[in-house]
Amino acid sequence: MTTEKLDWLAALPRYTQRFALFVGERCRESPLSDVARQTGLHWHTVKNLDTLYLQEQLRRAGPPQPQRIGIDEIAIGKHHQYRIVVSNLDTGRPIWFGGIDRSEASLDLFYATISPENKAQLKIAAMDMWKAFRKSTLHHAPQTLIIYDKFHILRHLQDAMDRTRRQEYKQLDGDERCYIKGQRYTLLSHWKNLDQEGQQSLKELFRVNRRLYKAYLLKEQFGQLWDYRCPEWARKFFAKWKASLRWQRLPEFEKFAAMIEKHWDGIIPYCDPDNKVPLGLVEGLNNLIRSLQRRAYGYRDEEYLRLKILTHKLPAL
């Protein structure tokens, strides 16, 4: 009688491959504590089996060779602790998670993991408007086209809208304040996404506050920028949108317009059909990571969290 040698289970030889696969597949959908109760194993044993399963998934996937990447930071704890997530935009999966913050040096660690040939074949990097990410990318792969992620830009616009709301609230008193109070969600939402009650609340607010009405219209109109396929027409649209700010006394929107002007070279490439990338994918991965953290009670072991993130889109063994 012979015993099959299972290289990837060498660290836990008491368990069969079939059982290890069962535990790993269950951990893809359930918290470790639930799998431990189901199998009668200790929590740490389940985690160790799952770790081996995740490592084997990565080994079989092989080294990534992306041509279009997305770069973002994710907060993993209190006190502004950040890690960087790099995704392959063509396959829709994260390929690197690491660093100690969101600095240029931390992103340099990613580029150190890919070959010179892979750096040379990078075509597009989608990111937010963080200077450190841009500098690192252009240093290691200068031919890469930088595109700023639409959803990060719109988040800045929403912040401008919210700050305008707070400023208006502070300047008013008495009955006029009651129209603004409790309207944060409706002012940040798209009109078409609001129910009838939400739309009616905004109508009442706009009837008494023309500045918030104008700010909301500008917020809604700005999204049209990504519909243009001609850079010249996109530029004309933005110039007209910016001109609409005159005499409106909307300083937060003016700051936003100045930021867009400064970063225009990373926005306009999206007009070219050849540069279309799934903007928002990285933000979706952020939501995934937050879900993983909640489900696993924080994943105190950062290496385990890294494995969970990098294998989420990989097929089961």
Image (cartoon, rainbow, N blue to C red):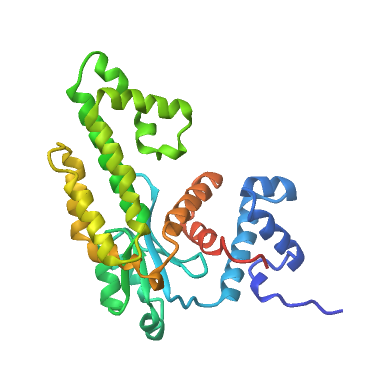
The answer to which of 23 and 271 lies nearer the viewer is 271
Is 44 rendered above or below residue 294? below
What is the quadrant of residue 70 in the picture?
Answer: bottom left
Q: Quadrant of the C terminus?
A: bottom right
Residue 231 rendering spot, x and y as whole percentages: 28, 66
Residue 262 quadrant = bottom left
What residue sits 40% from the left and 63% below the top?
98
Residue most extreme to the bottom: 117
Q: Measured from the top left, where is residue 16 in percent x and y?
A: 75, 66
In the image as oriented, which residue stretches furthest toward the left? 247
In-image side of 117 versus 140 (left or right): right
Q: Position of residue 203 (x, y in %)?
A: 35, 26
Q: Looking at the picture, tell me which residue is in the foreground, 72 or 203.
A: 203
Residue under the image location 49 percent in, 55 percent down: 301
Foreground pick, 38 / 148 = 148
> Looking at this rendering, what residue extends furthest in the right direction?
1
Q: How many marks?
A: 0
Q: Is residue 315 left or right of residue 253?
A: right
The residue at the point 34 percent across, 52 percent down is 224
Residue 313 in view of the camera = yes
Quarter of the picture holding the N terminus: bottom right
Rendering coords of residue 136 (x, y %): 27, 70
Residue 160's quadrant in the figure?
top left
- Can residue 80 be seen by looking at this rendering? no
Picture layout, residue 107 above or below residue 221: below
Q: Where 216 falls versus 265 (above or below)?
A: above
